[in-house]
């Protein structure tokens, strides 16, 4: 407190000085403002340092496994066996080799599946909500979407576990199919498909809310110009409104993708809890095969942290999650940059 | 009023936004190959009137209309009317220049491509060049057709918007205060352009600028509080208005 | 190091002293928290109960005493506990509760004598009778010896299966001994054994028996037992399994329920993630050197395995007996029904001990803690979810 009072005293002197320097002199910033500026600057610097610290920490922890595994971390499987091995023979160099291909594939497949849903069905919803919905229906629908976007993901996990998984196992998986596949993987409803459905339910509302905001804030003058040129409402949406809203739509998709990539609990509940790499050669059964994502793996195997090799392996998963975040934000930057310079193209 | 056959015939047109009545039983005949200027103070209903001509008011949820607007003897507010077809016939230029965020060429070609997706490339180029020429913009942009339309100056942008409308060959062109955002030089260019356009189109111009109305219009309609107070040949109306309020407005007593 | 040495020597001296005193006196002596209780009159035994002079015991236990001459009533108060006795009456009161005593308080040579066990236990102390020395040992506080003087810290690590129980036990122990700090970390049984042998922790938590391959010199104290149950869906007609069948199922040699008397349907195997102590034990008991089949679902908890088995007709899994409920069915194993009874009486064999290992016999604070765990208070905590060793 004492210090503050001293500073207050010193404020008076420069202000008096500035009042004598003339009308056109830039007024000195009050001391308090300066202090606030400095504090804000420090906080900003601190938070960015924190981010780098987190990255450094995660990657440094991941290095033993990444170094021992090399590219086979990305291109080979066998995670569960590796993990058990590392757990049982803690400390051995051979236990540091991990293959996370199924986990990476699981993450990419669930996320991209949910994104496909967003960019088709979700975009349709957003268009309806912002362009076609009758006025009396819009408000209730919008609040519903926002409410859905705020529901904690574990709730969607429960819904998935109680409704989606049993539905898939009852109606999509026959006893014969399951028997035929049992040597390759256990089909019990927990699957890539269930993961995609649950993720879609989870990130759909977020995407719809953001996309419909973006569509609504597309400049009205473009819409009027297009309509006045004799384009139908639909053609106007496709050719003018969506391109103008593209930035916001992409931002929504990236935010949704970010949440999808990092989702752990809900997915670990419905995707099958086994590091299985679905095989496209199985046709549509591909979607019924179990998977496990990087984030779910960290949660499921967290108990193994006490063994250094296991810990490093989990941090290796974490570093891949971080990497995907960095890529996403880079992607969004490139995209918005493109829009600013190039603009909407008709072709 | 005129022996010439009228292009647009408005009869007892009343418009409401919710409970506010924006137009009161307006009747008016608009003639082809001429420029009709619509004047009046802000909020008098002249822009609303203009936007009824291409049914752009349909976008407003609370909009309600009574009366008839016949274009070439066809009531455009008949329920079975295809709005899109009306808008192809009735082009519109807005107060704020609003070229699309795409290249100059694409701006002009946009509507043409939409209406005729299978158009040949050469044919399309001919239309674009012709439209730009008629909009008096060709000489200024012929070397940079691939540059974004947004990089042009305000006056050029507005002429680009006119070219965009001309390209889809409408019969009627509506201009909603097209020069209010522009400097005098650009304004003069657009006025000159409008003067040429009236040979082939029916032109309706909403304007704030009395001088502009006087310079370019063949007919002038004076709106006040949703009423069409006076409508007649520009020369007559300006010289000896029959209504007191018109006289006051022209004299600058309000506006 | 110095401190613990000091404590050890102190305990040794005191013990020697007590033994000598007991022998020297040849009469009943009372020890409170390791110190002999000094009394102006000698305690005596009446109907098998030890009676001691009122003032001495109450003051030593930190209670205030009031004597009402008119009603011949003794009231003692310690904290929120109040006890009342009447000379010559077998009725007594603890708080508002009426208690019937085996022997009433008495007056002898102008001194009031009260039954030691009743007053000490009512005031929260523990009473033990060492008949060979005619010694009554009274300990106050949580239960360990000399609880009032307990302080210091303990480190524990090891099995994540034991961890929740260990944490619950330490929490109660620390509440009763505020100066004691105990930290419990996981790591798995192997880590617990290794850390205890290396001296990194005072106590290692292990959810299996010690093996020959484990480091020498470790002393195991069994604190509880936990049964592992193989479970299937209630709709599954299979209701008996053999150890061999379980092994074949979990290693992928049998994949169809038909092969073991069920329907023609695939067996969905549900296992635990590698770090699980339950998995450790299951693997040791059923699979030996073989690994669980690669298609097995790997769940992070008992609850998730139960949920998975409850949700799929063709599923099989294994859970701790504490997690059994009607949503899953436990087939007999080698003809034995997996019940708590059978686990207790030893007919159901898939029971693993929860043990706490120390390097050498437990001493000092570790001993106090283990004594507490084995006391009826500690075992009552064990009983909540596991099989008590009593």
Image (cartoon, coloured by chain):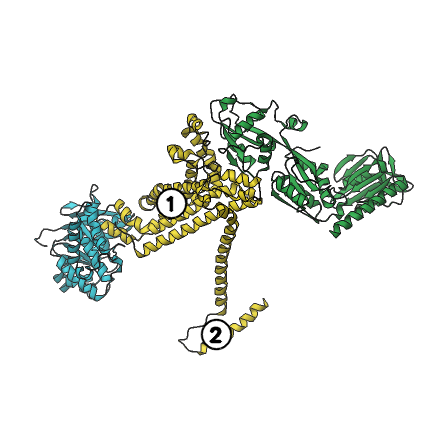
Name the secondary structure under disc 1. Answer: helix
Chain A visual colour: yellow
Chain B visual colour: cyan
Residue position for label 1: A208
Q: Which chain is green?
A: C
Q: Chain of mark 2?
A: A
Looking at the rendered image, the quarter that the C terminus of chain C falls into is: top right
Residue drawn at x 78%, y 50% is C6
Percent of width and height locating residue C345: 68, 27
Whichever of callouts 1 and 2 sits on the residue coming sooner in the sequence is 2
| Classed neighbour count for the residue bearing mark 2: other residues with Cα under 10 Å, few (<14), some (14–19), many (≥20) | some
Rendered position, A103 above or below A229: above
| Classed neighbour count for the residue bearing mark 1: other residues with Cα under 10 Å, few (<14), some (14–19), many (≥20) | many
Name the secondary structure under disc 2. Answer: helix
On whether disc 1 and disc 2 are found on a single subunit, the reply is yes
Percent of width and height locating residue B172: 16, 52
Residue position for label 2: A15
């Amino acid at each position: 407190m004492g210090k503050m009072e001293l500073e207050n005293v010193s404020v008076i002197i420069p202000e008096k000085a500035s009042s004598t320097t003339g009308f056109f002199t830039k007024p000195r910033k009050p001391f308090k403002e300066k202090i606030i500026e400095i504090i804000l600057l420090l906080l900003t610097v601190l938070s960015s340092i924190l981010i780098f610290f987190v990255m450094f920490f995660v990657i440094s922890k991941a290095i033993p496994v990444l170094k021992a595994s090399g590219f086979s971390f990305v291109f080979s499987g066998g995670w569960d066996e590796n993990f058990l091995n590392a757990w049982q023979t803690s400390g051995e160099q051979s236990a540091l080799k991990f293959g996370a291909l199924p986990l990476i594939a699981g993450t990419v497949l669930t996320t991209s599946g949910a994104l496909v849903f967003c960019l088709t069905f979700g975009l349709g919803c957003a268009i309806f909500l912002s362009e076609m919905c009758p006025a009396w229906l819009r408000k209730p629908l919008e609040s519903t979407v926002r409410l859905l976007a705020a529901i904690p993901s574990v709730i969607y996990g429960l819904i998935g576990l109680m409704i989606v998984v049993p539905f898939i196992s009852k109606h999509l998986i026959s006893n014969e199919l399951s028997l035929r596949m049992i040597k390759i993987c256990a089909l019990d409803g927990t699957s890539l498909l269930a993961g995609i459905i649950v993720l879609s339910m989870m990130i759909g509302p977020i995407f719809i809310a953001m996309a419909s905001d973006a569509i609504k804030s597309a400049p009205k003058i473009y819409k009027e110009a297009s309509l006045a040129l004799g384009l139908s409402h639909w053609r106007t949406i496709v050719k003018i409104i969506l391109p103008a809203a593209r930035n916001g739509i992409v931002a929504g998709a990236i935010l949704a993708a970010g949440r999808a990539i990092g989702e752990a609990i809900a997915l670990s509940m419905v995707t099958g809890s086994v590091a299985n790499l679905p095989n496209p050669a199985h046709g549509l059964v591909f979607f019924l095969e179990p998977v496990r994502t990087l984030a779910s793996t960290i949660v499921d195997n967290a108990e193994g942290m006490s063994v250094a090799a296991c810990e490093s392996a989990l941090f290796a998963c974490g570093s891949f999650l971080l990497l995907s975040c960095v890529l996403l934000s880079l992607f969004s930057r490139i995209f918005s940059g493109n829009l600013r310079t190039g603009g909407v193209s008709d072709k | 009023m005129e022996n010439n056959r009228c292009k647009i015939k408005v009869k007892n047109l009343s418009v409401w936004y919710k409970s506010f009545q924006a137009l009161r039983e307006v009747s008016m005949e608009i003639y082809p190959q001429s420029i009709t200027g619509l004047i009046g103070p802000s909020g008098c209903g002249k822009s609303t009137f203009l936007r009824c001509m291409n049914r752009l008011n349909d976008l407003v949820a609370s909009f309600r209309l009574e009366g008839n607007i016949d274009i070439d003897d066809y009531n455009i507010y008949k329920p079975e009317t295809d709005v899109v077809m009306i808008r192809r016939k009735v082009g519109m230029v807005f107060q704020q220049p609003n070229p699309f965020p795409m290249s100059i060429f694409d701006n002009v070609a946009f509507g043409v491509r939409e209406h005729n997706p299978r158009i040949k490339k050469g044919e399309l180029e001919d239309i674009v060049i012709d439209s730009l020429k008629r909009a008096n913009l060709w000489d200024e942009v012929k070397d940079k057709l691939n540059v974004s339309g947004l990089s042009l100056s305000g006056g050029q942008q507005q002429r680009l918007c006119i070219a965009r409308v001309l390209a889809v060959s409408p019969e009627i062109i509506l201009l909603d205060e097209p020069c209010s955002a522009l400097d005098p030089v650009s304004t003069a260019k657009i006025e000159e352009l409008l003067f040429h356009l009236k040979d082939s189109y029916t032109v309706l111009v909403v304007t704030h600028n009395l001088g502009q109305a006087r310079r370019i219009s063949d007919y002038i309609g004076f709106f006040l509080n949703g009423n069409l107070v006076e409508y007649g040949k520009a020369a007559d109306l300006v010289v000896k208005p029959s209504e007191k309020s018109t006289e006051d407005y022209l004299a600058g007593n309000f506006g | 190091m110095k401190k613990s040495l000091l404590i050890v020597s102190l305990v040794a001296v005191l013990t020697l002293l007590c033994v000598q005193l007991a022998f020297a006196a040849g009469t009943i002596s009372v020890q409170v928290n390791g110190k002999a209780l000094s009394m102006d009159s000698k305690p005596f035994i009446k109907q098998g109960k030890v009676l001691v002079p009122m003032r001495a015991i109450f003051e030593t236990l930190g209670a205030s005493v009031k004597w009402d001459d008119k009603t011949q009533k003794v009231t003692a108060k310690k904290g929120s506990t109040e006890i009342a006795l009447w000379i010559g009456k077998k009725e007594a009161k603890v708080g508002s509760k009426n208690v019937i005593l085996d022997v009433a308080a008495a007056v002898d040579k102008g001194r009031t004598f009260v039954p030691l066990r009743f007053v000490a236990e009512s005031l929260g102390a523990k009473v033990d009778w060492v008949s060979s020395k005619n010694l009554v040992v009274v300990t106050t506080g949580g239960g360990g010896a000399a609880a009032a003087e307990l302080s210091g810290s303990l480190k524990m690590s090891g099995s994540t299966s034991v961890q929740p129980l260990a944490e619950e036990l330490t929490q109660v122990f620390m509440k009763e001994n505020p100066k004691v700090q105990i930290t419990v970390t996981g790591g798995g049984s192997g880590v617990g054994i290794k850390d205890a042998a290396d001296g990194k922790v005072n106590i290692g938590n292990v959810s299996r028996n010690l093996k020959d391959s484990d480091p020498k010199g470790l002393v195991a104290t069994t604190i509880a037992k936990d049964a592992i149950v193989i479970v299937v869906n209630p709709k599954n007609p299979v209701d008996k399994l053999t150890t061999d069948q379980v092994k074949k199922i979990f290693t992928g040699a049998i994949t169809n329920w038909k092969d073991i008397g069920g329907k023609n349907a695939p067996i969905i195997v549900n296992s635990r993630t590698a770090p699980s102590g339950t998995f450790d034990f299951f693997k040791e008991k059923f699979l030996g050197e073989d690994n669980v089949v690669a298609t097995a679902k790997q769940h992070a908890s008992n609850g998730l395995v139960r949920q998975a088995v409850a949700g799929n007709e063709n599923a099989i899994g294994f859970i701790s007996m504490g997690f059994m409920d009607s949503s899953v069915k436990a087939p007999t194993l080698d003809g034995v029904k997996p019940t708590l009874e059978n686990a207790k009486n030893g007919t159901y064999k898939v029971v693993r001990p929860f043990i706490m290992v120390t390097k050498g016999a437990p001493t000092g604070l570790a001993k106090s803690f283990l004594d507490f765990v084995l006391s009826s208070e500690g075992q009552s905590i064990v009983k909540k979810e596991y099989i008590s060793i009593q």
